[in-house]
Image (cartoon, rainbow, N blue to C red):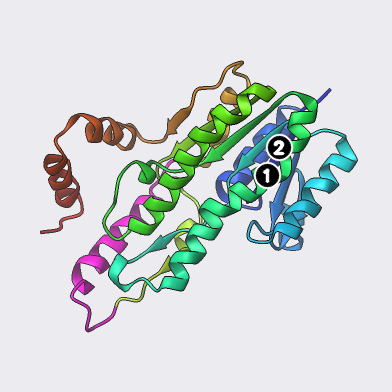
Amino acid sequence: MSKVVFITGGSSGIGKAIGDFLTEKGYKVYGTSRNPDNYVSNSKFTLLKMDVGNSSSIEEAVSEVIKKEERLDILINNAGVGITGPVEETPDNEILKAFDTNVLGPIRVMKAVLPQMRAQKSGLVINITSIAGYMGLPYRGIYSATKSALEITTEAMRMEVLQFGIEMANVAPGDFATNIAAGRYHAPQLDSSPYKKAYGHTLNMMNEHVDQGEDPSQMARAIYKIIQTRKPKVRYRVGAFLQKFSVVLRRVLPGRVYERMLMNHYKLK
């Protein structure tokens, strides 16, 4: 019997790559999108209408899958938003939106699927975080904070649900060639801002990193391998070697040395 996979943010980028790959491997995949009708002709799997910011839409989508399949084996929390800007100049409402989508959104979805997994006495939850969540990156501080929060929340929940036969894992990607740069919120580059020059330069670098990022199919293969693992690890990192190695450096280098390394990378004084 094919395992049933539920992927949030399945209409494009990493989510779509994972859904397509798992469908080809014989899994029964359901993805979600706020506007699934826009992607029907471009998807190999079923897309359901859902917004991670709306609990009612989450309950409806999860209930639809369980009604059709009578089970839900794997949740992949992939939906998220990008946000850039000096923390001082990022509007409070945009900060709240980022935390709502990137942290509360996955928690809402986990709350919706866990009762079914508990009834089955089995299940796997994979939360897509980010290598940016391992460090405070300049002009990406809010994004880093949201992904770090999801990482820590998953670590706690993993210990809570293990008694029910449910496994959890974090997967932190580096830069991948997706449309996240086009969809992320950018705090405006104000002419009067003391951050204007440094922020503008860093923003250009970030967009270049995404454009030159890894192929999303690499994430799909990594997720497939994790699904095949009997006892998944707490965390995985996927991406370019230097991006993964930066996490190791953060752990072993003195804080000020690592900070200087980052500032040199972004050419900040």
Q: Is residue 197 above or below residue 126?
A: below
- In the picture of the structure, the residue carrying the numbered disc 2 is 114
Image quarter hosting the C terminus: bottom left
Q: CA distance from mark 1 to mark 2?
A: 6 Å
Secondary structure, magenta segment, majority class: helix
Q: Amino acid at mark 1?
A: Lys
Residue placed under numbered mark 1 in the picture: 111
Position in image of residue 145 (x %, y %): 38, 52
Q: Is residue 269 left or right of residue 89?
A: left
Q: Residue at x 46, y 40 (%)?
A: 151
Residue visible at 41% across and 45% down?
Answer: 148
Task: Say what secondary structure mark 1 lies in.
Answer: helix
Q: Are marks 1 and 2 in contact (CB under 8 Å)?
A: yes
3 vs 102, left or right, is right
Quarter where residue 165 is shown:
top right
Q: Is 212 in the magenta? A: yes
Q: Where does the magenta region start and end?
A: 190-214
Q: Quadrant of residue 197?
A: bottom left
Q: Secondary structure at mark 2?
A: helix
Residue 74 painted magenta: no
